[in-house]
């Protein structure tokens, strides 16, 4: 990732709950989903063994790093149906599901970057989506989306 | 009978193209819609058929939105209206695309009304008028 050549000093990425704000806005506006603070049910779901989808977007600019969203398959399918306005009972193809989850991460990352540094230009890479067996909660933010867990984690270059 | 208003939706996400297409169709406007997955494919479509307006994403593989817009200017297609549909709502990005003859901007995530409002500016007599 390139280092910025200007003297622009980006703000701390974690300021003012921008991550929560960005994810909430995208979930509510594009996926018609209710976002709330997590409760015991979501914490328990994260602790238990499960299969998850992980959607990651790399970004570059005054800040560089990776924005990652992890969510369970049931929620992924729910969001897919809401995004496209289709019947949830109709199973989504894996490729189409990955496309929508990539867009979720892409929109949330773009929104977050605009919130934390609206004056700067960032480049977002094509999202990557995969299945994982474990949800890594280290340094991550847990949210309840339609009462199911959704985890957001950030890796910012040069920050611990 | 006047020809239908034709738009080209350029986005690397098939699903996002479907959502934009649905938002356009929800307006009831009599619009013909073509699609492309990146700037390169968009140029092929523009070579092949008349298009009144391009709705393009910014970050795409193969050829990005700004690269597409620059190429459109280079090829003398300044008569085609340009709309950017992007997650990047930063002031710097808006400045960049404004210099590329972009007149309208839709921020993702968007409500269908945002597409309707843009379409109303591009095509003042929709709905088969």
Image (cartoon, coloured by chain):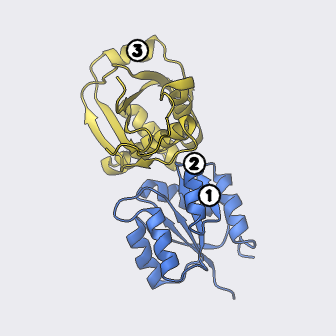
Chain colours: A yellow, B blue
Q: Which mark is residue B89?
A: 2
Label 1 vs label 3, nearer the camera: 1
If the image is split into quadrants, where does the N terminus of chain B sit?
Answer: bottom right
The crowd level at tag 3 (other Cα within 10 Å; few <14, some 14-19, many 20+) is some
Which residue position is annotated with label 1?
B105
**Residue at coordinates 37% horizontally, 20% vertically from top-left?**
A139
**Percent x, y of residue A58:** 36, 42
Chain letter of mark 3 equals A
Q: How far apart are the two marked residues, 3 and 2, measured between alpha carbons? A: 33 Å
Q: Outermost residue, top direction?
A: A40
- Secondary structure type for disc 1: strand
**Percent x, y of residue B123:** 70, 72
The answer to whether A95 appears left or right of B23 in the picture is left
Q: Is residue B111 at least partly visible in the picture?
A: yes
**Residue at coordinates 40% horizontally, 42% vertically from top-left?**
A101
The quarter holding residue A73 reads: top left
**Percent x, y of residue B105:** 62, 57
CB-based contact (under 8 Å), mark 1 and mark 3: no
Q: How far apart are the two marked residues, 1 and 2, measured between alpha carbons? A: 9 Å
- Secondary structure type for disc 3: helix
Which residue position is annotated with label 3?
A43
Label 3 vs label 2, nearer the camera: 2
Q: Is residue A153 above or below residue B111?
A: above
């Amino acid at each position: 990732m390139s280092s910025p050549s200007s003297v622009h000093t980006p703000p701390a990425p974690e300021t003012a709950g921008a991550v929560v704000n960005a994810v909430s806005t995208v979930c509510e506006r594009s996926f018609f989903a209710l976002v709330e603070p997590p409760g015991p049910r979501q914490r328990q779901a994260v602790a238990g063994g499960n299969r998850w989808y992980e959607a990651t977007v790399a970004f570059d600019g005054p800040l560089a790093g990776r924005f990652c969203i992890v969510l369970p398959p049931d929620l992924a399918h729910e969001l897919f149906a809401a995004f496209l306005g289709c019947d949830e009972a109709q199973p989504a193809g894996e490729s189409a599901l990955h496309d929508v989850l990539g867009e979720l991460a892409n929109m949330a990352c773009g929104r977050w970057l605009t919130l934390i540094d609206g004056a700067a230009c960032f480049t977002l890479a094509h999202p990557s989506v995969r299945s994982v067996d474990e949800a890594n909660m280290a340094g991550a933010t847990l949210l309840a989306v339609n009462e199911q867990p959704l985890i957001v984690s950030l890796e910012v270059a040069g920050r611990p | 009978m006047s020809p239908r208003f034709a738009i080209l939706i350029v986005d690397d996400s098939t699903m996002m193209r479907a959502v934009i297409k649905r938002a356009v169709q929800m307006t009831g406007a009599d619009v013909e819609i073509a699609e492309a997955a990146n700037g390169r494919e968009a140029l092929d479509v523009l070579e092949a058929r008349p298009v009144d307006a391009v709705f393009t994403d910014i970050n795409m593989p193969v050829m990005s939105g700004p690269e597409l817009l620059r190429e459109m200017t280079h090829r003398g297609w300044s008569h085609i209206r340009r709309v950017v549909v992007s997650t990047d709502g930063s002031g710097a990005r808006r400045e960049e695309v404004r210099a590329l003859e972009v007149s309208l901007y839709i921020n993702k995530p968007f409500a269908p009304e945002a597409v309707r409002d843009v379409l109303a500016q591009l095509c003042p007599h929709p709905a088969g008028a």
